[in-house]
């Protein structure tokens, strides 16, 4: 049993004696085009955390299923109906609260596994503030924050994009996420609605208040049309292997 929300507290106490690596997946509730569910970032972060935790005898906490505000050039922005986002301070405080509670339980090793581009610095700040508190009481935790896509090997990206990788910021509801969903949750992909648009082109600055101008109406920022379950499998399996290896080595070196 990997998931803490399916354990009893007494089973959790027993499991903690093994000093497991604990995973906190973080996603978003955000438009992902007309073909992917709004929970895509949360679904992918959760499944990735479960897969990596399985290889490291870890535990997985319930996912933070909301994320920081969608930005025009990385998620289409906040003007889409459905996108439901947190203020930065809410995400910071939530992260800090969870780390504080885990420390109280005796958790020593934590991986915050992020599936939503815009979350990164708010998760970082929550971790930093929690560490400052923990250090003041003499008990820092070994915490890793990671975006899972950073582990996808370059050779895999070359293969699935045929040398035309647009960059992760534009990979919103596009080839990577669509392929991963086609492999992991095909029943949630509206295959007939995959947009045929090409890559969005944006100004090299952001404007506020966000007005939604310039972005594709579909909400998909780069081509998704080449997506397939086979590409998803390649991305997923190589990424799981790379993350598992990197985290295993990190925690072994620090133990
Ligand atoms: Zn996404
Ligand atoms: Mn996102």
Image (cartoon, rainbow, N blue to C red):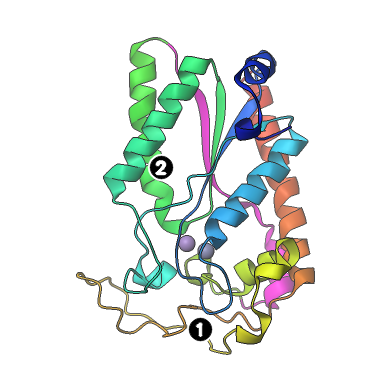
- Is 219 inside the magenta-drawn segment? no
Alpha-carbon distance for marks 2 and 1?
29 Å
**Is 164 displayed left or right of 200 in the figure?**
right
Can residue 150 be seen in the rendering of this structure?
no
Dot placed on the residue nearer the N-terminal end, 2 or 1: 2
Label 2 belongs to which residue? 123
Question: Which range is magenta?
Answer: 139-164
Of labels 2 and 1, the one closer to you: 2
Q: Quadrant of the N terminus?
A: top right
- Is 155 inside the magenta-drawn segment? yes
Q: Position of residue 152 (x, y in %)?
A: 66, 57
Tell me, yes or no, whether the two marked residues, 2 and 1, touch with CB atoms within 8 Å: no
Residue at horizontal 61 percent and vertical 48 percent from the top: 46
| Residue 199: mark in rendering | 1
**Is 209 displayed left or right of 98 in the figure?**
left
- Residue neighbourhood size for the residue with mark 1, other residues' Cα within 10 Å, grouped as few (<14), some (14–19), many (≥20): some
**SS state under label 2:** helix
Residue at horizontal 27 percent and vertical 70 percent from the top: 206
Q: Position of residue 159 (x, y in %)?
A: 74, 72
Return the residue nearer the eye: 101 or 53. 101
Can residue 220 be seen in the rendering of this structure?
yes
Q: Quadrant of residue 94?
A: top left
**SS state under label 1:** loop
Q: Quadrant of the C terminus?
A: top right
Q: Position of residue 56 (x, y in %)?
A: 73, 32
Placement of 98 over or under 116, stated as above or below: above
Return the residue nearer the eye: 249 or 207. 207
Q: Quadrant of residue 21?
A: top right
């Amino acid at each position: 049993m990997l998931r803490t929300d399916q354990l009893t507290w007494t089973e959790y106490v027993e499991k903690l004696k093994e000093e497991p690596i604990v995973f906190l997946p973080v996603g978003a509730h955000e438009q992902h085009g007309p073909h992917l569910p709004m929970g895509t970032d949360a679904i992918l972060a959760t499944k990735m955390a479960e897969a990596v935790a399985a290889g490291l005898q870890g535990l997985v906490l319930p996912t933070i299923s909301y994320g920081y505000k969608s930005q025009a050039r990385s998620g289409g922005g906040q003007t889409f109906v459905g996108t439901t986002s947190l203020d930065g301070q809410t995400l910071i405080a939530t992260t800090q609260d969870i780390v504080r509670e885990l420390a109280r339980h005796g958790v020593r090793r934590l991986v915050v596994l992020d599936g939503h581009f815009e979350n990164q610095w708010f998760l970082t700040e929550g971790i930093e503030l929690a560490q400052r508190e923990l250090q003041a009481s003499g008990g820092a935790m070994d915490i890793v924050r990671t975006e899972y896509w950073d582990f996808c090997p370059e050779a895999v990206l070359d293969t699935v994009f045929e040398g035309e990788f647009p960059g992760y910021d534009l990979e919103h509801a596009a080839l990577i996420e669509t392929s991963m969903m086609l492999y992991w949750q095909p029943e949630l992909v509206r295959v007939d609605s995959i947009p045929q648009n090409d890559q969005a082109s944006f100004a090299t600055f952001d404007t506020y208040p966000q007005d939604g101008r310039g972005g594709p109406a579909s909400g998909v920022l780069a081509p998704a049309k080449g997506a397939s379950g086979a590409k998803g499998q390649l991305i997923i399996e190589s990424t799981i292997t790379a993350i598992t290896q990197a985290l295993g080595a990190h925690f072994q070196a620090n133990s």
